Image (cartoon, grey):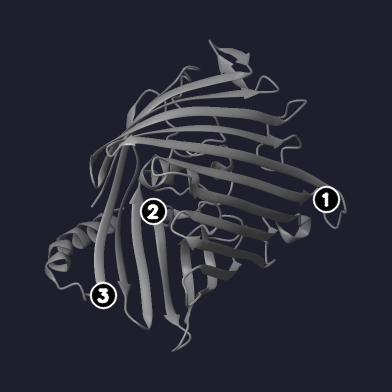
Amino acid sequence: MKKILTIILSAISMSGFAQTESAKNPLTITGYLEAYYAYDFANPSDHSRPSFVYSHNRHNEVNLNLGLVKAAYVNDNVRANLALMAGTYANANLAAEPGVMKNIFEANAGFRMSKTKNLWLDAGIFASHIGFESAIGKDCWNLTRSILAENSPYYESGIKVSLISDNEKWFVSGLLLNGWQRIQRVADNNTPAFGHQLTFKPNSKITINSSSFVGSDTPDSTRLMRYFHNLYGQFQLTEKIGAIVGFDIGAQQKAKNSGDYNVWYSPVIILKYSPIDKVSFAARGEYYADADGAIIYTGTENGFQTYGYSLNVDYQIHSNAVLRFEGRGFTGKDKIFTFNDEPSTQNYLLSTALAISF
């Protein structure tokens, strides 16, 4: 950990130099910090929120969800990114990773494969190619992440080949991965995993994206193949109103070489309204169905079949700082939550966060 802190402090000391260089300097140093407070009305004694939540997952304490420092280098032919992080997000979401790997947000390098096309090959640890939400809360419309975002990859490691079209309306990539949100492979797993991403932006107001994953997250001796697809569209309907519509669906074998599958799916819709420059509201409705517990295991009769709903208010303190407030609720088909130390189908949360990028 001391080595990580030394690297971070060194990077910060370099930031002044990087900022005084001309715009042509290929090296940039940036940072991000998000502090939060969340109150879960289940009042868990261990201060841990439900197990399917990985971001903002601590109850009744002021904490750091994510703090990171990033160095990025890019020129016409090569590029590299290194970002080190700390926070409750890292503790929860990278719990399976060994040692200091838990503190790596991003670490990758790449080179341009064509002199005439924007075609790149990159290798290392990346932010996930799946979904419209990320661990950087400030870039998301809601304070907390959707259930589908929390339970699909936030990060991945492997090799990626990507192409941006000449008119910059299309982005396509193919990936060879170590697994489903894995830096270190599962023991005895040598099955290659694959992914794709296809993004279409006909103009600045519309984004349509398709992403997939094919692979296994189990040892080869008990290999369960997983097939997953994410589809979303982001639309700026008017100057003040935006919408995101997303749908995840996945299937995993019930047993090795089986033709029977456990299926899960999740639709989500988010509406954002910005009446004035510094204030915005976002309402979210979602449903996550995983009756067989392929991704979220409950051990109950109907598994995880849960509706979610939230409303948040954002105040833009500065161009790089936002203060956020959110109320959120869940309603499950079974009593998978607790309230007043009793099993319940309901769960409610109030949270606030301050996020700053620099």
The residue wearing badge 2 is: 103
Asked if the residue at tag 2 contacts the one at tag 3, i.e. Cβ–Cβ closer than 8 Å, the answer is no
Q: Which residue is drawn at 75% across and 49% down?
A: 251
| C-alpha distance separating marks 3 and 2 | 25 Å
Q: Which residue is drawn at 67% across and 68% down?
A: 192
Q: Few, some or many C-alpha atoms within 10 Å of disc 3 (few <14, some 14-19, many ≥20)?
A: some
Residue 76's spot in the image, x, y percent? 35, 82
| Rendered position, 184 above or below 167 | above
Q: Residue at x 47, y 62 (%)?
A: 126
> Which of disc 1 and disc 3 is earlier in sequence?
3
The amino acid type found where label 1 is placed reads: Ala
The amino acid type found where label 2 is placed reads: Asn
The residue wearing badge 3 is: 26
> Which of disc 2 and disc 1 is earlier in sequence?
2
Any part of residue 187 in sight? no
Any part of residue 14 in sight? yes
The residue wearing badge 1 is: 255
- Image check: 289 left or right of 281? right
Residue 15's spot in the image, x, y percent? 17, 62
- Image check: 188 left or right of 89? right
- Image check: 49 left or right of 319? right
The foreground one among 343 and 348 is 348
Q: What element carries label 2?
A: helix
Q: Which residue is drawn at 43% across and 58% down?
A: 204
Q: Is mark 3 on a helix, strand or loop?
A: loop
Q: Few, some or many C-alpha atoms within 10 Å of disc 1 (few <14, some 14-19, many ≥20)?
A: some
Residue 90's spot in the image, x, y percent? 42, 46
The amino acid type found where label 3 is placed reads: Pro
| C-alpha distance separating marks 3 and 1 | 50 Å
Residue 144's spot in the image, x, y percent? 45, 36
